Amino acid sequence: MTEQEIINKVNALLVEEFEIAEDLLTPEASLKQDLEIDSLDFVDIVVLIDCEFGFKPQASELKNVKTLGEFYNYIQLHV
C-alpha cells in the first residue's frame, strides 16, 4: 500500500466516522488539539485501523503519535 493510499483511507475514515472537516486534515494537524480526537475516539480508531489495515495498534505506541502526519507514518510502518 502506498503512502498516498494510506493518507486517503485514513482521511476518509476521519471524515466519515468522526465528522472531521476535510480541510483540517493536514500532516501538521495535532490529533488532540486541532482534530479534537479524545481517548474514547482512539478506542474507535484502533478498531477501524484493525479492520481497514489488518493490524491492531498498541495504545503504548499511539501515545507517542501527536500529529496526523505521525499517524500516517505509524500506519505505513505496520502495513
Image (cartoon, grey):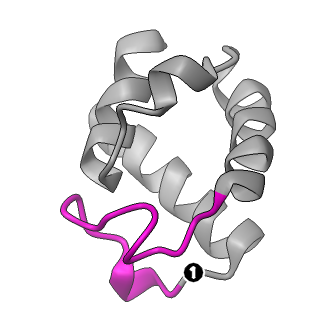
Overall secondary structure of the magenta section: loop
Q: Quadrant of residue 27?
A: bottom left
Whether residue 69 sits left or right of residue 78 in the image: it is: left
Q: Position of residue 10 (x, y in %)?
A: 52, 51
Whether residue 46 sits left or right of residue 5 in the image: it is: right
The residue nearer to you, when weighing 61 against 57, is 61
**Residue occupying the point 37% across, 26% down:** 74
**Residue occupying the point 68% across, 82% down:** 19
Badge 1: residue crowd in 10 Å (few <14, some 14–19, many ≥20): some
Magenta stretch: give its range: 21-38
Quarter of the image that includes the N terminus = top left
**Residue occupying the point 33% across, 48% down:** 66
Callout 1 amino acid? Ile
Residue 61 visible? The answer is yes
Q: Quadrant of residue 20?
A: bottom right
* Residue 72 against residue 77 in the figure, above or below: below
Q: Secondary structure at mark 1?
A: loop
**Residue occupying the point 26% across, 48% down:** 69
The residue nearer to you, when weighing 29 against 64, is 64
Residue 1 visible? The answer is no
Whether residue 5 sits left or right of residue 39 in the image: it is: left
Question: Is 29 a magenta residue?
Answer: yes
Q: Position of residue 46 (x, y in %)?
A: 71, 34
Q: Residue farthest to the left?
A: 28
Q: Return the residue at label 1.
A: 20
* Residue 12 against residue 9 in the figure, above or below: below
The residue nearer to you, when weighing 31 against 7, is 31
Q: Position of residue 54 (x, y in %)?
A: 70, 16
* Residue 55 against residue 9 in the figure, above or below: above
